[in-house]
């Protein structure tokens, strides 16, 4: 489909000296050493300061965090000194971090710090047991990082973000087959049109009480619930000889080889999709902060512009946008943006409405959609891009 086809230098010797990492013998060590990677089901979040703009693929980020934590390197790629913060060794977060990120057990970790203490005087990271103390420490220090279990934190402060997540349980397929619904719509447009017509006529919606479904322009299967599949369907609706384009979000299922429409919903954020594991506020907070946005329209460059975007706990706003912009980000990064863009005065058609759906990743959002004037005619295909601005480096850093 058009898409709408588709985050200080090393601390001085800590008073605690990280003694919780020097575990020897006992039931804890035995349990940790016998546990395999699959035993540490999370999820767990590696948290960093909100001004830390480092981003890469998961393997590269994991490798760098491992080297920073173990003292093999002392600074982030932008030159900012790192400040690893530890967790109590008997906590689930510390055990999962050791096994899944550091690739070590507690005995290996203890030996590592003992060897470093003898050869370099480097001490283990300071251990901070409580999240209420850990989060402010990360927020105060631009190079700080630490691991938390998702169950420990309900909401992140504005100056803390998630760098990456690990240890999440494997997703289990829930609900009806998305692939079967997708294949059915592609192969059976007449049956889909018939189902749309019957559903609309019986829906009580005065706008579609009469008429019939026409051409299906495009569609996208967005996910599944326990009983249905959510489909975004873009099609024409004919009433008394006139034809208008409609976009509906429909919960559908296959029954005896036929498509049944169960319900129309306002949009993807109004449905709890089984294919996207809810992460609560910690997932939404990962996107908080200032982003750089750019809108580029193919056939109407007068709509194109650059602007600043602020995301605050899921709400998208732009204070220097020429026009109006609103939107939201869900806990898994799903984004819905509505734009009313005003061209330069005297440069062509009036305001254009652009609705974009996409998904944020660590590298930002890139989505495209058609622009329509207030009269309903399409004037362009527009691309929307949002990226986090690169950190400003000082003259001394080069």
Image: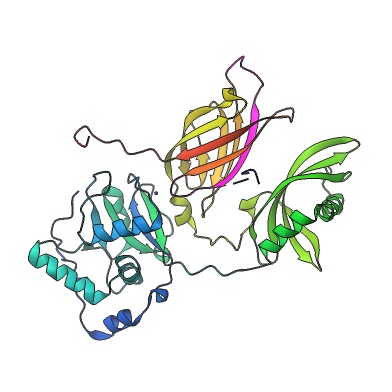
Residue 139 place in picture, x, y as percent: 31, 49
Q: Is residue 388 above or below residue 278?
A: above
Q: Quadrant of residue 389?
A: top left
One can see residue 129 in this view: yes
Q: Is residue 271 above or below residue 168?
A: above
Judge by depth and name the residue closer to the eye, 200 or 204.
200
| Of residues 16 and 64, the one drawn nearer to the viewer in this rendering | 64
Residue 151 sits above or below residue 32 on the image: above
Q: Is residue 321 visible?
A: no
Residues drawn in magenta: 344-363
Q: Residue at x 52, y 42 (%)?
A: 366
Residue 396, percent from left and from top:
18, 34
Q: Is residue 393 above or below residue 111?
A: above
Query: Which residue corresponds to the image point at 18% horizontal and 54% vertical from the top-left?
Result: 10
* Badge count: 0
Q: Quadrant of residue 259?
A: bottom right
Quarter containing the C terminus: top left
Q: Position of residue 301 (x, y in %)?
A: 57, 24
- Tell me where residue 234 appears, x and y as whole percent: 73, 45
Task: Please tell me which residue is depicted at 52% across the width and 55% down the height of the picture.
Answer: 332
Left of 8 or right of it: where is 87? right
User: What kind of secondary structure does the magenta stretch mostly adopt?
Assistant: loop
**Residue 98 falls left or right of residue 380:** left
Q: Is residue 281 magenta?
A: no
Q: Within the magenta stretch, is there residue 358?
A: yes
Q: Tell me the colour scheme of the image.
A: rainbow
Left of 261 or right of it: where is 126?
Answer: left
């Amino acid at each position: 489909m058009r898409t709408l086809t588709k985050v200080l230098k090393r601390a001085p010797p800590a008073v605690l000296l990280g003694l919780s990492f020097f575990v020897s013998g006992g039931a804890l060590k035995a349990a940790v050493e016998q546990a395999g990677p699959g035993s540490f089901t999370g999820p767990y979040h590696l948290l960093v300061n909100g001004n830390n703009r480092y981003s890469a693929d998961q393997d590269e980020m994991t490798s760098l965090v491992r080297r920073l934590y173990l003292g093999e390197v002392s600074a982030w790629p932008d030159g900012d000194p790192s400040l690893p913060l530890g967790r109590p060794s008997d906590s689930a977060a510390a055990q999962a971090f050791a096994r899944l990120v550091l690739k070590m057990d507690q005995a290996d970790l203890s030996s590592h710090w003992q060897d470093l203490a003898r050869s370099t005087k480097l001490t283990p990271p300071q251990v901070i047991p409580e999240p209420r103390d850990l989060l402010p420490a990360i927020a105060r220090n631009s190079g700080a990082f630490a691991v938390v279990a998702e169950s420990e934190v309900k909401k992140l402060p504005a100056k803390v973000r998630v760098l990456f997540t690990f240890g999440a349980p494997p997703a289990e397929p829930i609900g009806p087959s998305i692939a079967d619904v997708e294949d059915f719509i592609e192969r059976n447009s007449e049956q889909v049109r018939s189902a749309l017509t019957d559903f609309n006529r019986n829906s009580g919606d005065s706008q579609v009480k009469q008429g019939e479904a026409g051409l299906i322009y495009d569609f996208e299967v967005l996910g599944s619930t326990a009983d249905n599949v959510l489909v975004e369907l873009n099609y024409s609706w004919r009433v008394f000889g006139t034809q208008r384009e409609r976009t509906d979000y429909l919960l559908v299922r296959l029954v005896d080889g036929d498509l049944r429409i169960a319900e129309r919903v306002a949009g993807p954020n109004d449905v709890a999709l089984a294919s996207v594991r809810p992460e609560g506020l910690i997932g939404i907070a990962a996107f908080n902060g200032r982003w750089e946005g750019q809108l580029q329209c193919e056939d109407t460059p007068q709509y194109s512009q650059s602007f600043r975007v602020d995301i605050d706990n899921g709400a998208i706003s732009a204070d220097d946008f020429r026009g109006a912009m609103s939107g939201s980000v869900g806990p898994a990064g799903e984004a819905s943006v509505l734009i009313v863009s005003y061209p330069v005065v005297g440069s062509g058609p009036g305001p254009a409405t652009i609705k974009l759906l996409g998904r944020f990743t660590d590298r930002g959002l890139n989505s495209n959609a058609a622009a329509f004037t207030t009269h309903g005619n399409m004037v362009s295909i527009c691309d929307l891009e949002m990226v986090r601005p690169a950190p400003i480096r000082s003259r001394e850093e080069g």
